[in-house]
Structure formats: C-alpha cells, structure tokens
Image (cartoon, grey):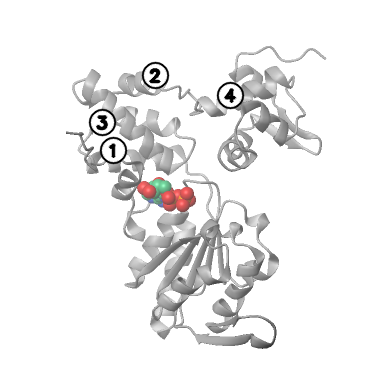
Amino acid sequence: EPIVASAGDSNPDDRERKLRPRRLDEMVGQRDVIERLKIAIDAASGRGEPLGHILFDGPPGLGKTTFATVIPAEMGTTVQMANGAGLSAPKDLLPYLTNVSERSVLFIDEIHRVPKAVEEYLYTAMEDFRIDIVLGEGVNARTLNFELQPFTLIGATTRAGMLSAPLRDRFQIREHLGWYSDDQLCELVIRNARKLAIEIDQPAAGEIARRSRRTPRLANNRLHWVRDYAQIKAKGTVTIGVARDSLDMIGIDKLGLDKQDRNYLETLIRVFGGGPSGLEAIAHTMNVSSDTLEDEVEPFLLRSELIVRTRRGRMATSKAFEHMKMPPPTV
Ligand code: ADP
C-alpha cells in the first residue's frame, strides 16, 4: 500500500492561507495605504458603485495578494483570482470577465505579464465594462459585444515600470507596498505564533522579525521552521537562542539573508571582483533566471545598501564585502 501524504498544513500554500489576514484590521503595517483604501471603499459603497480599479506594486511577499482578498471581504463581495502569465490570448479573459458579478473583484497577479493583445481588451473592460471580441477572419469576421457587470479590477505587479502607460492610467487607485519595520514584523510573528499555538517570547519574536528581510511572507516561513525546530530540539518553547540556532541551521544570517542572497553577493565579489557586472552575467554564473534575481534577490540587497545599480552594472558596496567577510579590492 502506498503511503499517501495527508494534506495537513505542510503544503506551503495551505500554510500561507492559514495565516493570511481576512480583514483590513487584521493586517499589520501599511497604515497609510489602509487608511486611503478604507475611504475609497466606504465612499464607493455609499454610492452603491464598484470601487475604482486598484494597482498594487512592490516586491514579492509584502501583501499584494492579501489586499486583493481582504478588499472584497470588506466590501462583502467575491473575488476571482487570475495570473497574467495564464492570460496569453484574449479568449483566456472571457471566463473571468463573463463571471464577474456586480461590484465583484477580478484580481490579476503579475499583471505585467499580460501580453499586449490581451491588454487591449482590458481597456474597454475597465473603462466601459464592455468587451468587443472579433471572431473569425476576413469577410467572415464578426464582432461580438459583451456588456459586463460593473466590477473592480485589482492588479498586482513586482514591475510597475513594465506596465504600459494606457494600462497604468486606467487604475484609479495606485498603491506601492513598501518594506515593513522590524517592529511591525515582530507584531506579526507574535500574532501568528498565537494562531499556531507556539510558545514564544518577545526577544525571540524580535530575532525572527530581524531575520525576515522586512517581508511578512518570510517572517511566516521562518516562524514555521522555528516551530518545527523547537518542537524537536527544545520541547516546543521558542527562546531567542532557539530562534538563532534554528535560523543559522538553514543558512539565514543576521541580516536575514538566505543562501541565495549570499550566493549573489559572493558571485558578485569573488567572480566579478565586486562589479560592476551586468545582471545577466551574474544570473548565468549562479545558474538562476535574471527575473528571479531582479524580483526576489536584488530589491532587499539594494535597500540594505549591500549593492548599488550603476549605469555599468551592479556593484557590491563596502558593507557587502564586510558582511561577507571578504577583503575589499585594493585600489
Ligand atoms: P504578495 O502578493 O505581495 O507577494 P502576499 O499578499 O501573498 O504577498 O503575502 C504573503 C503572506 O504574508 C500572506 O499570506 C500573509 O500571511 C502575509 N502578509 C502579507 N502582508 C501582510 C500584512 N500586512 N499583515 C499580515 N500578514 C501579511
């Protein structure tokens, strides 16, 4: 008999869902964004209109998808989830658009990956709640016009700069999600530890927060690992020592950098002498995609002033040499 793994909560998606806030008041940080959204939501609801289209941008794991699920919950409406990478032809949009109900939300994650030919259908959908689809070709071509229910499109992207101006301009509300403070992440860790019935004290929560790259998703991931470790090695109690030892064990250092982050710095310093080096060259050497580096690795390294971007490429800063305990180049 094969042993079938139970779904449990070992699946990262399930874990993520379990800790995802359901209402705006359950979210930590982003107070100014939340303040503005509350006003827009209340105003639209008061008028009985759909909320204006919203674009969220910012690095991965900072709450874009969370907002996209919390906002419809606040409005008492439903949400459909789509991904820009899955919308390769206009027909891929149809099931979503024909399913929108009045004032419901359509969420398109990675909206910068929607191809131009599909993007154009979004324009009339967003502006006039209408789509005109051309079927057939030449003399047989005919246009079908669909009236859509007035709805709200929420788009999310890690690359705001890659959106075309016409698409960007059709979002009435644009919000950038920035990094969280250590205090905000500490609050998140304590709150989620309670949800998961983990025994943890303030210093330990602070240590996990400081090693989470200012990112709620990473704080939650680290907390799950620390819990496993504590259960096996420390009778389930998370102290600061337990937090440190468990995070050291999986290669997360004092700045919160993981193995891939340090591999990036090491490549830039050891192979390219600290730079300047092009992104592609670093990506090839590390054998990872340049998209991954640009989306997931570089933003935090830039923010931490471990690297800088110059016209000639990426450069490691003296802080990076120090952190990696590598001798800076002699000039
Ligand atoms: P993104 O879509 O920007 O990549 P997500 O919204 O999926 O990020 O966030 C990842 C996880 O981090 C969520 O499942 C949620 O548990 C947590 N999270 C993100 N932002 C917040 C927040 N402001 N408050 C509490 N938890 C958050």
Q: Position of residue 34 (x, y in %)?
A: 44, 60
Instruction: Tell me what residue is drawn at x 48 percent, y 39 percent.
Output: 214
Find the distance from the CA under tag 1 to the CA under tag 4.
Answer: 27 Å
Comes first in the chain, label 1 or label 4: 1
Find the distance from the CA under tag 2 to the CA under tag 4.
Answer: 16 Å
Q: Position of residue 8 (x, y in %)?
A: 22, 41
The residue at which mark 3 appears reads as 200
On-image quarter of the N terminus: top left
Mark 1 sits near ligand 1, with its Cβ under 8 Å away: no
Kindly tell me whether residue 196 is visible in this rendering: yes
The residue at which mark 4 appears reads as 263
Q: Is residue 226 above or below residue 91?
A: above
At label 4, which amino acid type do we have?
Asn
Comes first in the chain, label 2 or label 3: 3
Comes first in the chain, label 2 or label 4: 2
Disc number lying in front (1 or 4): 1
